[in-house]
Amino acid sequence: MSENKIGVALVHEICPICSKSMNEQILMNSVLNKKYAKEIENVHGKAIGYSKTACEDCSKYKDEAVMCIAIDEAKSEPNNPYRTGQVVGIRKDFQLFVDKPEFIIKTENGVPYCFVEENVGKQIGFFK
């Protein structure tokens, strides 16, 4: 175990839409003991959660599209959708979004997105 009482880690958040790494930051423990130092060192290089904002690439489309994220409902848990890795931007005037705006979530920087069950998305032509 580390003899060091100060743990330091470089961590990052991930884009809530495409899951790309963003918002790198440095963490340090404020309680100076070996246990907390080791806990901080164990998260070095890892993602610490989703960002409240979308990355620069996803933000480019915020005025034209709703970003649709494919999920597997069978593997999802409440408040933790299981993402399959497919993301597609669909025009904001698509009838589903006009009729059901409550399905759309927005990041703090205004990027609209929603989760779509992968098989449903395939049926309506969103996903391959």
Image (cartoon, helix red, strand yellow):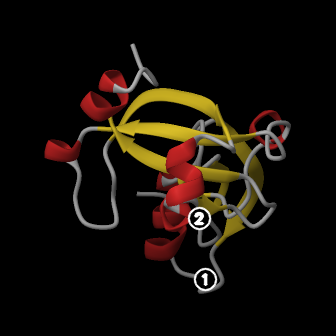
**Residue 127 coordinates in the image, percent (x, y):** 42, 21
Q: Which residue in the protein does label 2 denote?
A: 4
Where is the C terminus found, in terms of image quarters? top left
Q: Which residue in the protein does label 1 denote?
A: 32
Residue closer to the observer: 114 or 79? 114
Q: Identify the secondary structure beneath mark 2.
A: loop
Foreground disc of the pair 1, 2: 1
Q: Is residue 12 visible?
A: no
Residue sitting at 76 percent across and 43 percent down? 55
| In this picture, residue 36 sits left or right of residue 17 | left
**Residue 91 coordinates in the image, percent (x, y):** 68, 36
Q: Amino acid at mark 2?
A: Asn
Q: Amino acid at mark 1?
A: Leu
Residue 51 vs 95, above or below: the answer is below
* Residue 80 figure quarter: bottom left
Residue closer to the observer: 120 or 11? 120
Residue 3 vs 14, above or below: the answer is below
Residue sitting at 31 percent across and 44 percent down? 82
Residue sitting at 74 percent across and 38 percent down? 58
Q: Is residue 83 visible?
A: yes
| In this picture, residue 112 sits left or right of residue 19 | right
| In this picture, residue 31 sits left or right of residue 118 | right
Q: Identify the secondary structure beneath mark 1.
A: loop
**Residue 35 coordinates in the image, percent (x, y):** 43, 74
Q: Residues within 10 Å of mark 2 (few under 14, many from 20)?
A: few
Q: Residues within 10 Å of mark 1 (few under 14, many from 20)?
A: few
Residue closer to the observer: 65 or 44? 65
Residue closer to the observer: 84 or 64? 64
